[in-house]
Image: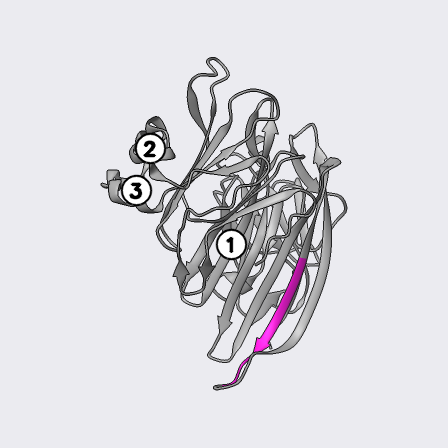
Amino acid sequence: MLRARTVVPCLILIIAAACSAQTGTNTDGLQSRTDVTSSEGLESLASPSDVPEWLRESFREAWPGGADVDDLLDRELNVLRLASSSDGPPAFLAWLSLDRLNGLGLLYEPSQEDPNEYVVTYRVDRPVAEVSFDQPNRFLILTVIEEAGSGVFGDWFRMLKPVSGTFREVWRGVAYSAKTRGSEYLVQRQGGLITNPSRSDSFLQSHVTQLLYQSPGTAPEPLLQVERIDAYQWDSEEDRFIPVSPMPGVGRYITVESAFTVPVGALNVFIAEAARTYVSSEGVLRLVNDDGQVVAAEASVEPGTHVLLWIPSGLAPGTYRVELAPELEGEAFDTAEIELVPER
């Protein structure tokens, strides 16, 4: 079996006047709490009585399935007040995470038509594990649990920043992933984000990937470790961050997540929402070898989501391209190069 050699990121590192609000996580589940430390630009509403009634009612109505969550809202609802960059009213971020599978996050901002009214401007239908707010740059960074299954764990960064007066998602990438291989091996990726308070148009993402071996009754032993730092720059035409230079597994619109965090024999590919301009219902992801031959394809791709691109069995090791195209035979408008190597 092959795996993809891409170095992608547990721990988020926001340097320079960033503050963090975290709900504890581990591989056994997720535990929510509301005792978030207050800091510049970010304030926790730790008591249920501090939460505005309109927000509570809105969150109750938005909860999936219309379940009765009053008791959970009293005990588990996390609410943060985000200071405005001016003297205007603040924004509110509310989230409720039951476990690694069920959760909801909502961002409320003052309506541009009526600042005295609040509207939902961003929604996360997944558990939120961590929140950080870089006040100087106005970066709101959510760590969202995207994958949780038998021996598979994957958390993704979602970075939001104000665009035309409203927070929008402008970048997404892996924060933490782990996949067990049998009873003795674990592939783990850890990483973080590095920002500069004087440079809101760029940031760095660090990556550390480890292959660990642990025999019964012993401590984990690192067999392999790879490190990398990638740079991202603001694209004012697309209103999002893009990679500064070509990087393994990263294109302008697609990010390839290797088989470490999905069932063996597949690539997990995230397609940026900005690709919607180029992708219709006939859009396709292709895996192409050095000879330009398509060896695998997945149709009906949806921008803003993850897509599994299955790796055919018996595929030879080597360098391949993941291509995003408007149709199966159409010309690719984005490409990410990866290296497929034999599984150890």
How far separated are the C-alphas under marks 1 and 3? 26 Å
Q: CA distance from mark 1 to mark 2?
A: 27 Å
Q: Viewed as shown, does residue 37 lie left or right of 28?
A: right
Secondary structure category for the residue under label 1: strand
Q: Which mark is residue 155?
A: 1
The percent coordinates of residue 205 (x first, y second) are: 68, 51
Region in magenta: 207-215
What residue would you read off at disc 3?
74
The quadrant of the rendering that contains the N terminus is: bottom right
Residue 56 bears which disc, if any?
2
- Which residue type carries mark 1? Asp
- Circle 2: is it few (<14), some (14-19), or many (20+) Cα within 10 Å? some
Quadrant housing the C terminus: bottom right
Image location (x, y in percent) of residue 125: 40, 42
- How many tags in the picture? 3
Residue 108 image offset from top left, x and y in percent: 45, 29
